[in-house]
């Protein structure tokens, strides 16, 4: 049982490039989400999904796209990378409404130069 | 005002000491409360849920004060391995989304 798997672990992009951060969970969790973590600001929600085919925006969605075609996968796309998107990105999943807490992936450290 | 606020610390304590810190939340409709632990450059991991009556897990004790809208975490007999950032996390009623505090850093020294 792998839990939540994120790839890649590290990535350097040039401004204007696009890429997809991958997230997969094998716990049959209905809820999945993407956060970014910046120093002193805590975790901020980018996008989330309450099930396959359903996604919604969090508090910092600009510059990012998501889709949820299966229960297991929830990729995050950076459309045109900017230095302000340099951050650590975490994917998380939960089996129900937040009262069960989240399981996090190990994170992706992204640098945009 | 942030939904969840924490004293960033750092709290520097010697091994064996007791350390305690609080977190305040602004939404009175909040339903579920958690403490997460995050080690440097690692993902957050659930430390414990916080129940209305308060609860213990080994050396860790969590309390909830709904009237004043804060939760607390107390660590007894601190170990070097307790050095980490502790995140306060709050969930609103009927909501999947969790709100995270920015974290309290604890450093336990030998």
Image: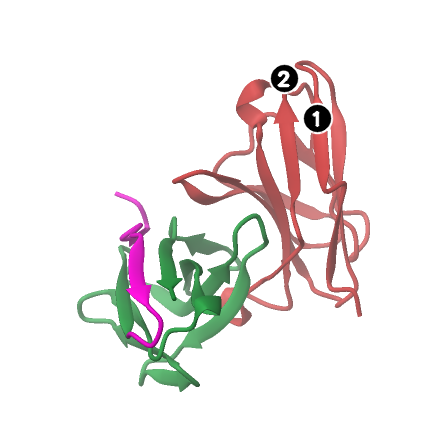
Q: Which residue corresponds to mark 1? A: A12
Q: Colour of chain A?
A: red
**B109 and B43: which is toward the camera:** B109
User: Disc 2: which chain?
Assistant: A
Provide residue B29's location: percent of width, then percent of height.
32, 63
Residue A40 counted in the magenta span: no
Outermost residue toward the top in this view? A16
Residue at image x 64%, y 32%?
Answer: A110
Residue at image x 41%, y 60%?
Answer: B86
Magenta span covers which residues?
A: B1-17
**B1 and B41: which is toward the camera:** B41
Residue B35 visible in rendering: no
In screen coordinates, is A13 left or right of B104? right
Callout 2 and callout 1 share a chain: yes
A62 in relation to B9, above or below: above
Crowding near pointer 2: few (<14 within 10 Å), some, many (20+)?
Answer: some
Residues at marks 2 and 1 touching, judged by CB atoms closer than 8 Å: yes
User: Disc 1: which chain?
Assistant: A
B99 in relation to B64, above or below: above
Residue at image x 59%, y 54%?
Answer: B43
Tell me the quadrant of the picture where the N terminus of chain A can be found: bottom right
Q: Quadrant of residue B13?
A: bottom left
**A49 and B53: which is toward the camera:** B53
Q: Which residue corresponds to mark 2? A: A113
B110 in relation to B58, above or below: above
Q: Colour of chain B?
A: green
């Amino acid at each position: 049982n792998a839990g939540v798997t994120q790839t890649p672990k590290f990535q350097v992009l040039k401004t204007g490039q696009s890429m997809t951060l991958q997230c997969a969970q094998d716990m049959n969790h209905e809820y999945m989400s993407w956060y970014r973590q910046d120093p002193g600001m805590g975790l901020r929600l980018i996008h989330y999904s309450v099930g396959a085919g359903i996604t919604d925006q969090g508090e910092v969605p600009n510059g990012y796209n998501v889709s949820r075609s299966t229960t297991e996968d929830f990729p995050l796309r950076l459309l045109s990378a900017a230095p302000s998107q340099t951050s650590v990105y975490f994917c998380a999943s939960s089996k129900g409404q937040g009262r069960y807490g989240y399981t996090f992936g190990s994170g992706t450290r992204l640098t945009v130069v | 005002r942030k939904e969840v606020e924490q004293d960033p610390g750092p709290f520097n304590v010697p091994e064996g000491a007791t350390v305690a810190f609080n977190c305040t939340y602004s939404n009175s409709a909040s339903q579920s409360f958690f403490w997460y632990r995050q080690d440097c450059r690692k993902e957050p991991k659930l430390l414990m849920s916080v129940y209305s009556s308060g609860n213990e897990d080994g050396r860790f004790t969590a309390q909830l004060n709904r009237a004043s809208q804060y939760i607390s975490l107390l660590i007894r007999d601190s170990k070097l391995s307790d050095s980490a950032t502790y995140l306060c996390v709050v969930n609103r009623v009927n909501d999947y989304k969790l709100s995270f505090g920015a974290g309290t850093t604890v450093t336990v020294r030998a």
